């Protein structure tokens, strides 16, 4: 069975699967401009660092295809910069949108300085650059899946079937397709070495129970849902072989920001001698940030903790602390960081960049 398709783009028409309605309803909504994309990202109708960048950039491609060609390349560059700067503000922790914006602006700057390129050709080149992100992300995810699967099997010699734990959602719903951490799990399943996936519910937004469980059931991958506070017991009693999670931003030293609850899983994995992996495209590595201490952490609305839908489930008047992410120190990433270029120890990232 094919993996879920959460982003549909064809000829300047962009639609996304509204993840707020899952698992009850698979409903696609149109993204007609950058404002639509910003709102969808902010409201978490689309989420996952790679998907945020793809939807943001494709929304700009939609606008460029629809808008009348600007008179000068300088005006075009200013238009693109304004739109990208705005998109970067939608979710501050994930670095992929920021890096995608920088890449696009670099191309725009080069085109602006090329006297042989007209404004129409420049606009078309930028649209082509933005649209290529979709196919590139799928190729990267497939590579991540294979690299991660190979490494886990190599480090689990003697075990015919593996038990893997994962957190949040890192599959087709968080990327252009296939997924990062869930892509590794798909590759293990494809290789017929997967016994069971244990996915956490991922409170308070329940991306694990709503989204990851939905993908696993959809693709008939053997899986079991656990509550977040069952992780330690599961590692001990169910003999988990590895934990694999995604990343919204990786610092130069390998410290990794991911969905809140990831840090505690890494601590537990270390205590139980369970391999801990982070799977992310190279675009999630922010070499401008030395350590995880400098990664901005988004704080989410208190209502995510105090309400289920419109029903209050917490005492009225209680204070809340609701960070969307936490930072896992590099020394706890014992399995490695899985990228499309291979699997690396955290301290190998900077030499790769140089």
Image (cartoon, helix red, strand yellow):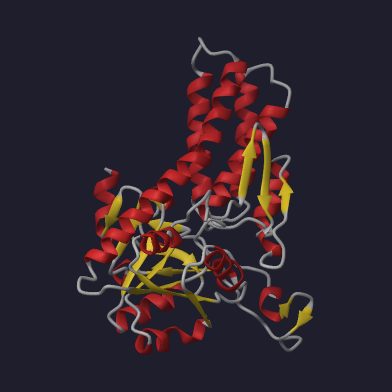
Where is residue 261? Give x, y as percent: 49, 75
Where is residue 192? Give x, y as percent: 35, 65
Horizontal relation, residue 320 to residue 112: left or right: right
Where is residue 134? Give x, y as percent: 53, 41
Horizontal relation, residue 70 to residue 232: left or right: right
Vertical order, 217 against 265 (above or below): above
The answer to whether residue 234 is visible is yes
Q: Quadrant of the C terminus?
A: top left
The answer to whether residue 252 is visible is no
| Quarter location, residue 234 | bottom left
Vertical order, 234 against 198 (above or below): below
| Quarter location, residue 196 | bottom left
Horizontal relation, residue 32 to residue 106: left or right: right
Front-most of 117 and 65? 65
Q: Residue furthest left?
A: 158
Q: Residue at x 49, y 61 (%)?
A: 170
Horizontal relation, residue 327 to residue 12: left or right: left
Q: Residue at x 68, y 70 (%)?
A: 301
Q: Residue at x 41, y 64 (%)?
A: 185
Vertical order, 268 against 5 (above or below): below
């Amino acid at each position: 069975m094919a993996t879920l398709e959460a982003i549909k783009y064809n000829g300047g028409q962009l639609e996304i699967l509204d993840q707020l309605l899952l698992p009850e309803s698979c409903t696609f909504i149109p993204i007609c401009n950058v404002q639509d994309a910003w709102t969808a990202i902010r409201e978490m109708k689309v989420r996952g660092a790679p998907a945020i960048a793809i939807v943001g950039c494709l929304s700009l491609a939609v606008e460029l295809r629809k808008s009348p060609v600007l008179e000068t390349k300088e005006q075009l560059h200013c238009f693109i910069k304004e739109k990208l700067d705005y998109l970067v503000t939608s979710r501050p922790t994930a670095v992929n949108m920021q890096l995608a914006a920088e890449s696009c602006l670099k191309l725009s700057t080069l085109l602006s300085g090329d006297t042989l390129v007209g404004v129409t050709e420049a606009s078309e080149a930028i649209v082509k650059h933005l649209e290529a992100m979709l196919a590139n992300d799928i190729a990267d995810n497939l590579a991540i899946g294979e690299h991660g699967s190979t490494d886990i099997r190599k480090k689990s010699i003697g075990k015919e079937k593996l038990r893997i734990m994962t957190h949040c959602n890192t599959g087709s719903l968080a990327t252009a397709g296939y997924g990062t951490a869930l892509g590794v799990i798909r590759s293990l399943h494809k290789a017929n070495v997967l016994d069971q996936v244990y996915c956490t519910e991922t409170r308070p937004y329940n991306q694990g129970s709503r989204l990851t469980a939905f993908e696993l059931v959809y693709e008939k991958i053997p899986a079991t849902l656990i509550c977040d506070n069952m992780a330690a017991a599961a590692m001990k009693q169910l003999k988990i072989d590895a934990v694999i999670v995604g990343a919204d931003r990786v610092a130069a030293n390998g410290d990794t920001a991911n969905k809140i609850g990831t840090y505690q899983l890494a601590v537990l994995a270390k205590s139980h001698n369970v391999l801990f992996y982070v799977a992310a495209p190279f675009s999630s590595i922010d070499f401008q940030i030395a350590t995880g201490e400098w990664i901005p952490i988004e704080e989410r609305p208190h209502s995510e903790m105090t309400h289920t839908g419109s029903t209050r489930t917490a005492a009225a008047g209680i204070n809340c602390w609701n960070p969307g992410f936490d930072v896992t120190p590099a020394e706890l990433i014992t399995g490695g960081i899985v990228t499309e270029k291979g699997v690396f120890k955290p301290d190998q990232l900077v030499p790769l960049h140089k």
